[in-house]
Amino acid sequence: MAKFLLIASAIAVTSAFQFPDGLLTEDMKERMVNNTKGIYWAPQIESLGEPVLLAEGAQRPAVIVHGMGDSGTNAGMKSICATVPKKYPGMFVLCSTTADGASSITQRLPKQLAAFTAEVRSHPELAKGFNAVGLSQGNYLLETYIALVNDPPVFNFVSICGPLEGEASCPSNLAFELICPLWKLDPYGAPLAFSSYWKNTKDQATFKTKSPVGGLADVLNARDTKNATVANNFKSLNTLVLIEATEDTMIVPKESAQFGMWAWGKSGKDAPIVAMKDSEGYKGDWIGLKTLDEAGKIHTSSFVGEHIRFTSQFWDETVLPYLGNQFE
């Protein structure tokens, strides 16, 4: 922490800051991961209810993506992924291991996206498309995949506590204790995944120009020049499911999980929230949200509690049904 603060103080006397080699030591990376453990890793989920039989060979496979600091091989993620073939016997599920552990924090999103795309394409079972479920930051990776790649295509996208409209404050919690001091040195350019979906709501013009290539401004199609491919990729979704935790302290503001955000020019807990349907992006159909909504393809839900602390019952009753479909 002292090293971060020393470097941060240097920013005041230089206008061209470059991150020094070795700033993120292995010890710091390990501490970052440990700080996300527990409340911010996927919960352990039990399989409930009776199996549902789908036509053999026609089941649409599923991909499940972990959040910041977590790994596809951790107990919580393994338990979640295991519920899919138990509910739908024979269904293929990929418990993504892209950017496991510290890489999910320190690896920039374009590199994560390339790795995730390669991971998906390495499985022939996914070649015709898949349903996708994200937890926390994993949703931003999926959102980026849909916007900029979507080949093979996503059918149903279920987002649980995702920073879909961005993160507008560095969260004040243990998980970000080491991340925030580093991120503050260069919010849009820090060597952190977080910088890709950072949105300073006090300054819309800077967001449009400084959001990194392949970052949030591109994913939300928010730059002045629009990308028709982004909108078309989202419009191709069968269903977009937006799930919010009522007491979320990781997604700031928590309404970002349902494409809400603080109003431009404002920030902080007392800033007004612009709901999805009142936003510029929705009204302009920048990524196809209006089209999806008017077709009845956007579903919203919430659970009482903290970030991704959903129950086995919620998972079984709210999430798994969106995975129970098959190719025609």
Image (spheres, helix red, strand yellow):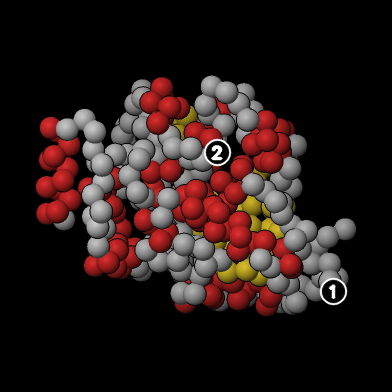
Q: Position of residue 219 (x, y in %)?
A: 55, 38
Residue 297 sits in quarter:
top right
Q: Which mark is residue 268?
A: none
Taking the spot 17% from the left edge, 43% from the top edge, the residue there is 8
Circle on res. 56:
1
Circles 1 and 2 in contact, beta carbons < 8 Å:
no
- Of the pair 222 and 80, the residue shown nearer to us: 222
Say whether residue 141 is visible.
yes
Viewer can see residue 318: no
| Element under disc 2 | helix
Tag count in the figure?
Answer: 2
> Looking at the picture, how far across and down is residue 46, in whole percent?
55, 76
Q: How far from the left and from the top, in percent, is residue 36?
A: 34, 63
Give the quarter of the figure containing the C terminus: bottom right
Residue at 29% x, 45% y is 183
Label 2 packing within 10 angstroms: few (<14), some (14-19), many (20+): many
Q: Is residue 232 above or below residue 242?
A: above
Q: Indicate which disc, 1 or 2, sits on the residue closer to the N terminus.
A: 1
Under circle 1, the secondary element is loop
**1 vs 2, front mark:** 2
**Residue type, label 1:** Glu
**In the drawing, does residue 162 fall left or right of residue 293?**
left
Q: Quadrant of residue 184?
A: top left
> Which percent across, then down, holds residue 240?
65, 47
Residue type of the residue flagged with mark 2: Val
Q: CA distance from mark 1 to mark 2?
A: 36 Å
| Residue carrying label 2 | 219
10 Å neighbourhood of mark 1: few (<14), some, or many (≥20)?
few
Q: Is residue 67 above or below residue 55?
A: above
Rendered residue at 40%/31% (across/down): 210
- In the foreground, 250 or 34: 34
Image: 95 above or below 263: below
